[in-house]
Image: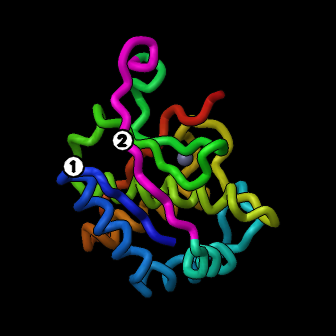
Amino acid sequence: MKIIFNDNQEQVTEATRMANSIFENQVFYDKINLKESFDLSTASPKIISELIKHSSLEFKIDLFYPSGWRAIKYRNTIAYVDHRFPNTLFLNLKKINRKPEDIAATIIHESIHALDNEAIDYTFGHGNNSSKGKANTAPYWIGNLALKILNNDFNTESIIFDQEENDD
Ligand SMILES: [Zn+2]
């Protein structure tokens, strides 16, 4: 798994570098392997960590700036994936005024969705887009694990990911 970002946007470039550093960090895989299970997942944490480690997926970040009706639709959306564009992460330019660590955690969260879409034998999403009760799903837990590692603080406060995504 590798994150690609080719535009010129400093925050996102830094977040991309951080996200790729997570994929090369053995602590990341070790922590997932220690988990017993994820909610809403047919794959064990160990299988998911293997899938992340060995996936050849190149996940490209595409910035978008919602205007008109899309500004309303995406008012709470930091990022989303669309099954019609399986290798693309759409990142909302209106929402990137955040710490690069937070953006990187969002990228990791979305990359778990991309991996879930790619892994036909398993499913490990988080159902609807409400963040309630999702902390122990793979995309949420792994996204927040990335944040903890990047902040070098395992007591760091968890963040809420995609409020609305891919509702086509
Ligand atoms: Zn999500």
Viewer-nearest residue: 72 or 9: 9
Residue at far right of view:
121
**Circle 2 residues within 10 Å: few <14, some 14–19, many ≥20:** some
Disc 2 and disc 1 in contact, CB within 8 angstroms: yes
Q: Position of residue 156 (x, y in %)?
A: 30, 61
Return the residue at label 2.
63
- Gap in Å between the C-alphas at discs 2 and 1? 9 Å
Return the residue at label 1.
9
Q: Position of residue 96 (x, y in %)?
A: 27, 42
The answer to whether 97 is drawn above or below residue 29 in the figure is: above
Viewer-nearest residue: 40 or 8: 8
Q: Is residue 67 magenta?
A: yes
Viewer-nearest residue: 8 or 99: 8
> Residue at point 44% right, 78% down?
28
> Residue at point 51% right, 72% down?
1
The number of discs equals 2
Look at the image and give the residue range highlighted in magenta.
Answer: 57-71
Q: Look at label 2 and name its amino acid.
A: Leu
Report if residue 117 is visible in the image. Answer: yes
In this image, 117 relative to 150: left or right? right
Give whichever of discs 2 and 1 has the lower sequence position: 1
Is the shortest distance between ligand 1 and the CB of mark 1 under 8 Å? no
Q: Look at label 1 and name its amino acid.
A: Gln
Q: Position of residue 122 (x, y in %)?
A: 77, 64
Q: Is residue 125 magenta?
A: no
